[in-house]
Amino acid sequence: MKTEKGMVTLEACVALLLFMIIMLLMYGLFPMYMAQSATAHALLQTSQSLALDNYAAKQVGEGKILGEDGVKDVMVLLVGDFLNIIPESDSGFATNKEFTEKTDNVPEIAKKRFVSYLVGDDSSEAETKADEMLKLLRVEGGLSGLDFSDSKVEGEDLKIILKYKLNYAFELDELGKADVYQETSSKLWS
């Protein structure tokens, strides 16, 4: 009888240890999954949005939407200032730039748009909010830890490439870090 009691205690200790290991593993993996999901969604929205902006910028540049033919003036009288969808300068959610293979500032534009979509804000506090959010999601370095430097235009495709490191909940030197590589590709509207 005494040996059976000892076996039950030993089995309970082993089962409890396994349960704790599984729970700690899940505690570390869920935030990593959340970080990858949030960044992947913002990256996809960024890519699609920038590809669409290319179309609007070309149409405005060629005078097809807001040209000098007075179409804008008539439409403003009918529907108000609704047609002012293309900003004079870049905001977090829109740009007036066309993208070609010669465009060299794609990484900066992509990062700015990514921040706006990540936090849903293009105000002056957007970068601070994004930095705080990314640090909560254990992205190493927060916003400064994101690398968009390989983003570019290839032919008619806009490729946005994001690289960063995610920290696991329990840091074990370099074992507690995961290198993340995310890439989106959108055909530029023309």
Image (cartoon, rainbow, N blue to C red):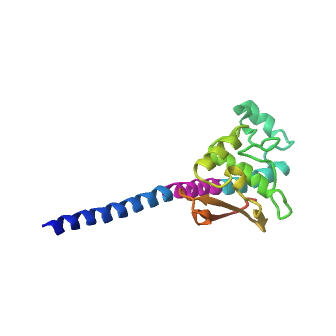
Answer with the quarter of the image where residue 52 lies.
bottom right
> What residue appears at the point 52 percent right and 54 percent down from the top-left corner?
31
Q: Nearer the viewer, residue 20 or 153?
A: 20
Residue at figure coordinates x 63%, y 54% from the top left: 139
Q: In this view, does 166 lie to the left or right of 143?
A: left
Which quarter of the rendered picture does the C terminus lie within? bottom right
* The residue positioned farthest toward the left in the image shown: 1
Rendered view: 55 above or below 69: below
Numbered range of the magenta stretch:
30-45
Residue 97 can be seen, yes or no: yes
- What count of labels does the image hold? 0
93 with respect to 178 (left or right): right
Say whether residue 38 is magenta. Answer: yes
Q: Which residue lies furthest to the front in this view?
A: 2
Magenta stretch contains residue 34 = yes
Residue at coordinates 74% horizontally, 59% vertically from top-left?
148
Q: Which of the 4 image quarters holds residue 13? A: bottom left
